[in-house]
Amino acid sequence: MNSRKLVSETRRAFPATKVHCLQPSRILIVDVTAPSWTNTCSVLSEALENTLCLACSLTGPCRVPLLSLYVVQNQQECLLPFTQVRESFARIQACISELRSLPREGCFPQGGNGVVQAVQDGLQQFKQYSRHTVAGGSTNSSVEITILTSQSSKEMVKNLEKKLKDVDLVSLRRIQVIEVLKRDFLEPEDVNQCMPVEETSSSDIAILGMDIDVQTIEDNVISLEMLFKTWLHDYGTEREHLHLLLPSGGFSHATAPKTTLMCLKCDLQERLLNPGLLSGTPDGTVRAADLNSPCQMAAWPATVLYKLQVVKALKSEGVCESVLYGLPFIIKPTSCWQLDWDELEINQHSFHALCHSLLKRKWMLLAKREPQNTSPNWNIMVHSYYIIVPSDSATLLVKAVAIRELLLPSTFPALLAEYPERVYGPIESALNSLEVEVAYNPLHLKSNLYKYLKSMLYKPVHRQQAQPRDQRPERHQPKQHPSKAKAMVAPLLMAPSPVQVFRPATMRRDSCEHLLIPKEYDEFLQ
């Protein structure tokens, strides 16, 4: 408990400024002295390149502002000094190519203080970089270090604790020690920790007034990619993202005054990346206006405090999926450091109690969003509504629900009671030939999006600059149209979001005859 308070006191020294400054810079230290580097090299390089091509392609505030990469051989070596990730993919790709070309196992002795020296050198370089950039308006003042190794994580932590006692750690937010192992070397309980789920099981070791996060993962592309994708989440903890307002007397409208509200302070987390952010201008100006939309929330960037007031409870079987729209967001109890520990604990317990009660009652919640700003007509406020869905985890799912003004008339003809046998047989035969899976797992599907984004990032900037018609050279070559990128990504915009993680408790046919709401909750990333 004391160590966590020290972290909070350190963070209080950092002013809450622009959103993009809240994302920490990254130092990645790769220990290549371990026995399994031969197996890890290729999968690590691919996973890192995939994640960084996403970071470079996403519009809006940069989610990984600075990156530095070290390798530890017989001594530490900095392959990539601190580099602004956006607009630097060619340099990053060259660094990853150099990482791939490193000698394989058996070339370097194990042991030594190479990792500790890399940590010290990285912190010193970050301090120097911060001093030089503060005059230019950059206020990013925190860094996180990720250490990838196949050596014992416990021994690594002991060495870090011993060697970093006298090092200035004010700018250091967290150290991650990731022990990368083959599945053959994993204990049965460790296999579950290696599954590519949103929250990897880990343990926190508190030393030096900050947390060292120790994790064990498997050396495959998906596990490492999910590790690096955690960098894309919002790491701002200066304030909560969402206030969920409930009647203080419970859900009974007869017992609680409507003016008395209980507030649960929550954070929003993206369930998936918005494909629409993979097109448009690099600075995100195309999508900037979306944040002010009265019918849309955004977990990134967390620029506003949303307020959702619960107005009704709904039976789970009474919600048709055709009236839900937009990207889903995960609601969690807030981890805002500005709240005292007692308030954080009570808030978390209240959130868990809400999740249990909703599951027990088989309820969803209908909530009205209180608008932050009025429309150009100062006396008109547009309200949007959301469905809050429970799950068997300590999280809720929130999705926008249709309102009267947006709903279009639709007719759903009834199914024929009888149909010709000559058409029934071929349909049954076609369905019987399909492979049946118990649950949908998005990790089993690839769309070549990584390849496409990398090909776009490889193109020099000057090829995409327009020239006056009279100055264009007379030669036949394919032209790059600004709409081409959007056209390539457009199919993703139509893809259904994986809302099936949070499912109603029973199955029901409603007026939307073509929709079946599944019967029970399940997590497909197990």
Image (cartoon, rainbow, N blue to C red):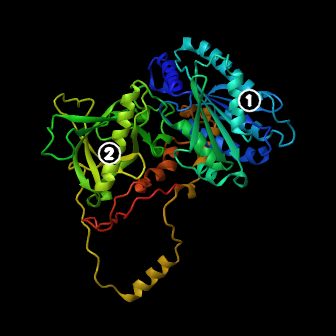
Circle 1 Cα neighbour tier, 10 Å, few/some/many (<14 / 14–19 / ≥20): many
Q: Nearer the viewer, residue 294 or 464?
A: 294
Residue 345 placed where, x, y %? 39, 33
Vertical relation: 277 (above or below) 2: below
| Residue beneath the point at 68% across and 32% down | 157
Residue 221 placed where, x, y %? 65, 49
- Side of 418 relative to 444 (left or right): left
Residue 339 placed where, x, y %? 39, 26
Residue linked to disc 2:
354
Residue positioned most to the right: 107
Task: Find out whether the residues at labels 2 and 1 contact each other: C-beta distance under 8 Å.
Answer: no
Residue linked to disc 1:
115
Residue positioned most to the top: 135
| Residue beneath the point at 27% across and 30% down | 372
Q: Nearer the viewer, residue 476 or 198?
A: 198
Does residue 93 appear anywhere in the picture?
A: no
> Which quarter of the figure has residue 45?
top right
Does residue 384 appear anywhere in the picture?
A: yes
Residue 209 placed where, x, y %? 57, 22
Q: What SS does tag 2 mark?
A: helix
Q: Nearer the viewer, residue 522 or 43?
A: 522
Vertical relation: 469 (above or below) 253: above
Q: Say what amino acid the circle numbered 2 marks.
A: Leu
Q: How far apart, in angstroms, are the residues tagged by discs 2 and 1?
A: 45 Å
| Residue beneath the point at 30% across and 85% down | 418
